[in-house]
Image (cartoon, rainbow, N blue to C red):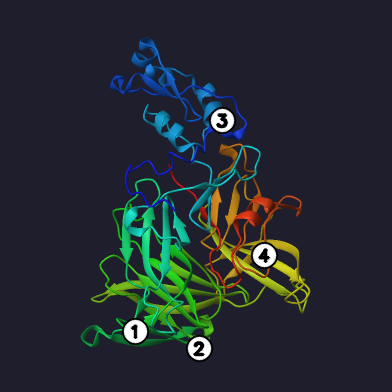
Amino acid sequence: MDSTGGNSGKLFDGMHLCLSEQGSPRTQSPAAVDPSLDRSGVVLGGMPKKMSRLELDAGVSLWAGLQPDILRIVLHFLPCLADRARVRANGHVLPPPLPLLVLPGFKFSSLSDKGDLMPVRCVPVPKEVAADDLRCVGSFDGWLVGVTPNKDRSDEYNRDADGDCFLVNVFSRKVIRLPQLCHMRYNFPAYSSKTLRIVNGSGVVHFGVNDIYTMSLCNVALSASPDSRGKYIVAASSDHKCASKLALWQPGMISWHICAGVDIDGPRDLTFYLGKLYVLQRYKIRLFAFEVGEDNGGLMVSRVKRCLSALPLHHPYQEGGAISCNMVVWRGELLLIIRHYNGDYRKRQLHKVEVFALDVNTNPYGLTEIHSLNGDCIFVGLGGCKSFPAGLHHGVEGDHIYFVPDDWKPYDTFVYSMRDGKMRSFAVKLLASEFDVDQLSRDFPVWLLPTE
């Protein structure tokens, strides 16, 4: 992997995720160019082209002079980040760019205007975090959450744990280091612990600060962008040697705040909604709300409540089958996405998909099944689920849900239509060729939805 750390802000220069690769006509970009650069312009495909003095002098006005109706049409065909930067520099407001899929090995693919994935591109990461065994476990806007294996291989118990953890902005290349994920030294003066009973439940959750811990992260959620001026919280789900943990961190903390309890064990989906952290047991439909505040030691969980533990009465869920659940925030609502499977563990087949809107004002939370996303679409993956305004771009369909692998069994790669309940395959060949890792790996694809 190329670990070059230069060319700040140009992480995607070599990707060519541009108009010309998506089957649309090549169009010369009218961005202003520094005359000292041999009067060389840039077309949308990334190839240099000589520009006349008249074109150089009028570079800004060419974009600025477009009629709004024509510009809106052009913007539908501008998923390329470099092209968007040129247009935005001239004062135009752009719709959000198309989502990117981060594959194992820090490879990227973009959606084409035909709704499929483009060939992958390897992207260099900042030098200080570059590693051949880097894994992505979450995203927020233009930020990715990365982890690398523990460097200490002497201890058999910890050798397959994670070590470094960091946030990296794939556009600015800024890196924020988080505490190590393998922490084996007690900090007795700063150590503290407590236990909270689960409201509406029979179990408890244990919390420890500045304790020892060993983690291998599965997925991570952020409460806000690290670019925001306010504080943000990082929530991470870990499963190392069947020891399940939930870890919390915010800037200023020197170690992770560890949460553990039998009731919240197992594969989890995480999301922040209305100031609370929601923890969903993916295969049991058990939903918990964590109320998170601050104290002198950093973060403090003041209350844990079980909000949901079953599907609605008279639900036609078949006994003996299996489910896989995810959460997503969509237009101010918290949605629950459920995949139903028939058959045993090894031969299970996808039976149907359901989507429910959660009513957070009832106890337990109410569920209302919905069959429309009002023209939006949703992207589901282990690193978090994202909603997207599909009507602003070609290449994504409204009222559709895009699934990529988030577990080995089942191994889902399909698109689901909310309108008629039909399913079709999605980028199966590309994902199969780029997903050649053993079943013990947690290196699953992560959706990245940059804001610009």
Horizontal relation, residue 165 to residue 114: left or right: left
Query: Is residue 133 depicted above or below 311 in this figure?
Result: above
- Percent coordinates x, y for residue 41 in the rendering: 40, 22
Depth order, front residue of 70/152: 152
Front residue of 445/129: it is: 129
| SS label for mark 1 | loop
Q: Could one spot residue 427 in this view of the protein?
A: no
Cα–Cα span, label 2 and label 4: 32 Å
Instruction: Give the residue type that dot 2 points to.
Output: Gly
Q: Residue at x 50, y 25 (%)?
A: 71
Mark found first going from the N terminus, 2 or 4 = 2
Q: Which residue corresponds to mark 4?
A: 411
Q: Earlier in the sequence, mark 1 or mark 3?
A: 3
Q: Nearer the viewer, residue 285 or 184?
A: 184
Q: Is residue 78 above or below residue 307?
A: above
Q: Is residue 103 above or below residue 149?
A: above
Amino acid type of disc 3? Answer: Ser
Query: Which quadrant of the figure has residue 90?
Result: top left
Q: Quadrant of the rendered structure where residue 268 is?
A: bottom right
In the rendered image, residue 249, in percent from the top left (x then y), is placed at 34, 70
| Mark 4 nearby-residue class (10 Å; few <14, some 14–19, many ≥20) | few
Q: Earlier in the sequence, mark 2 or mark 1?
A: 2
Separation of marks 2 and 1 at Cα, in angstroms: 23 Å
For marks 1 and 3, give the one nearer the viewer. 3
Per the image, the residue denoted by label 1 is: 212
Give the residue pinned by disc 3: 20
* Residue at which label 2 appears: 203
Q: Which one is closest to the eye, mark 2 or mark 3?
A: 3
Which secondary structure lies at badge 4? loop
Rate crowding at label 3 as few (under 14), some (14 to 19) or many (20 or more) other CA atoms within 10 Å. Answer: some
What residue do we see at 68% from left, 65% from top? 339
* Nearest-to-viewer mark from 2 and 4: 4
